[in-house]
Amino acid sequence: MITTMTIKKGIITAAGRGTRFLPVTKAYPKELVPLIAKPNIQLLVEELIAAGINRIAIVHRPGENRLKEYFQPDKKLENFLKENNKEYFIESLRRIWQKATIEFIPQTDDLPYGNASPVLAAKKFIDNDPFVYMYGDDLVIEEKTGQFLSKIIKLYEENKVNAVGATSQVAWEEISRYSSIKYKDPTHKIKLTKFMKNYRGVKHLPIPPLLAALLFRQ
C-alpha cells in the first residue's frame, strides 16, 4: 500500500549549457533570460511557492554562481533602493525570501547527461520525501500562478500513486528535441498507474507526441 505524504519540496534543473540560446547564454544561464520583467527561473520559483512548496533546490552547473547571486539578498542594493524610494523593484524577490528557502546544488561532472542526474545530485535534499521536479526552461502560462501545479499535487495526494507526470503537446517537427511519452491506452484515457514508455530523439511516433514537464516521486 502506498502512503502519500504532503509535498513541500521542489527541484528546478538548471545545469544545462543552454546551447539553443547561444550566444546569449555564453554570458549567463538561460534560466536568467528575462521574460519582460523577470527571468524564467523566478517565475518557476513563484509557481512552486504558490502551490505550497517552501523548500526549493536549484541544481546548477559546477562553478555557476550567478543563479545564487540572483536569489540572495543584497543589502547594499536594498539600501540604495530604499534611499531612492524604489524598493518596489525588488519586492517580488522579498516575497520569495519570506516564503521559501532556496538551496543551490552543483551537478558534478561525474554524473551522466540526462534528466535523472539532477535528482541524483539532490538526493540529500530529497531524503525520502516526495518532491516536485521542474525543468528550468519550462513555463506554465496560466491566469493564476500555481493553479495547475496545485491540481497536479492534489491528483498525486488523492490517488496515492508513486509518480505523476504533467505533459504538453509538441509539434511533430520539434519532437526529436524533447523527451516524449507513449500512452498504453490509444484513447489517451489512461489511469495514473498505467504510465508509459519514454522516448528521446525519436522523430516519428505512432501517437501524438508529448513533453514531460513536471514529476512527483515518493
Image: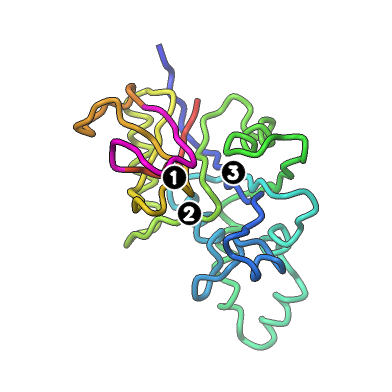
Left or right, 119 with respect to 181, comes to right
Q: Are marks 1 and 3 in contact (CB under 8 Å)?
A: no
> Dot 1 corresponds to which residue?
213
Residue 130 image point, x, y percent: 51, 30
- Of pointers 1 and 3, the one earlier in the residue sequence: 3
Find the residue positioned furthest to the right: 63
Kindly identify the amino acid type of the residue bearing the numbered disc 3.
Answer: Arg
Discs 3/2, front:
2
The label shown at residue 138 is 2
Q: Residue at x 45, y 56 (%)?
A: 139
Q: Residue at x 66, y 88 (%)?
A: 84
Find the residue positioned furthest to the bottom: 84
Using a 10 Å C-alpha cutoff, classify the residue at mark 3 as few (fewer than 14 neighbours), some (14 to 19) or many (20 or more). Answer: many
In the depicted structure, whether residue 180 falls above or below residue 63: above
Q: Are marks 2 and 1 in contact (CB under 8 Å)?
A: yes
Q: Quadrant of residue 208?
A: top left
Kindly identify the amino acid type of the residue bearing the numbered disc 2.
Answer: Asp
Q: Residue at x 29, y 36 (%)?
A: 206
- Foreground pick, 146 / 109: 109
Residue 60 image point, x, y percent: 69, 49
Query: What's the CA distance linking mark 2 and mark 1?
Result: 7 Å
- Foreground pick, 74 / 201: 201
Residue 212 image point, x, y percent: 42, 41
The label shown at residue 94 is none
Left or right, 205 with respect to 177, comes to left
Which region shows up in magenta?
Answer: 196-208
> Dot 3 corresponds to which residue?
55
Q: Residue at x 32, y 62 (%)?
A: 143
